[in-house]
Image (cartoon, grey):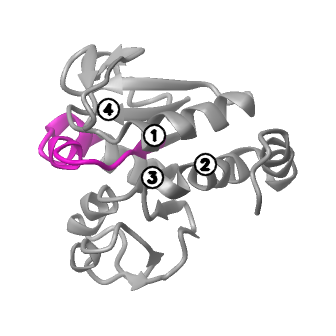
Amino acid sequence: MVYVFLADGFEIIEALAPVDMMTRAGIEVKTVGVTGELVKSSCGVSVKSDITIDEFDFYKVEAIVLPGGMPGTLNLENNTAVQRAIDNAVNIKVLICAICAAPSILGHKGLLSGRKATCFPGFEEALEGAQLSDSYVVRDGNYITARGAGVCIDFGLEIVKYLKGGELADKIRASIQCDD
């Protein structure tokens, strides 16, 4: 199961475009409402999450995804259950993905130290010890980071590539008419 964490102020496209790409790939995905079942995005659109943080299963995790947005990133970072979920993902060595400002959460935890990573411009200092990349989407081991809303499809397809292979990711890219 892939869990996408949603907190009030999240960037809607950075959460739902990857959900769409993973769903097309047949990956089981659940959105997790961190600030309640109904979560308000940074643009004011509310999204009903599949489950709340209280229902999150720490033991059935294939990957976790942290969308950016403000104050969504801060709301994720300040939530103890999200912090425990990240720690658990690190311990069991599953895929950890963050886009836009959200890589700062991983940076503050020291998880990107020595790894290639990217983030929304202006958050680079938060990626403590990371090897900063100019690429829009960066994978280093079981970490995927991305710059922002403009690359959310590429971010989602990189998750698909990691979990299901490049051939399927390329097939989905072609089917949605997305240029390389």
Instruction: Estimate the x, y position of residue 106 in percent, counting from the top left.
Output: 30, 61
Residue type, numbered disc 3: Ala
User: Do the residues bearing badges 1 and 4 touch, measured as CB atoms within 8 Å?
Assistant: no
For label 4, the SS is: strand
Please tell me the numbered disc located at residue 153: 2
When asked about the image quadrant of residue 109, the answer is bottom left
Residue extending furthest left? Answer: 78
| Part of the protein shown in magenta | 64-84
Check disc 4 and report the residue beneath it: 6
Residue type, numbered disc 4: Leu
Q: CA distance from mark 1 to mark 3?
A: 6 Å
Please tell me the numbered disc located at residue 13: 1
Crowd around label 2: few <14 · some 14–19 · many ≥20 (10 Å): many
Check disc 3 and report the residue beneath it: 149
Please tell me the numbered disc located at residue 1: none
Q: Decide which of tag 2 and tag 4 comes sooner along the chain.
A: 4
Residue type, numbered disc 2: Ile
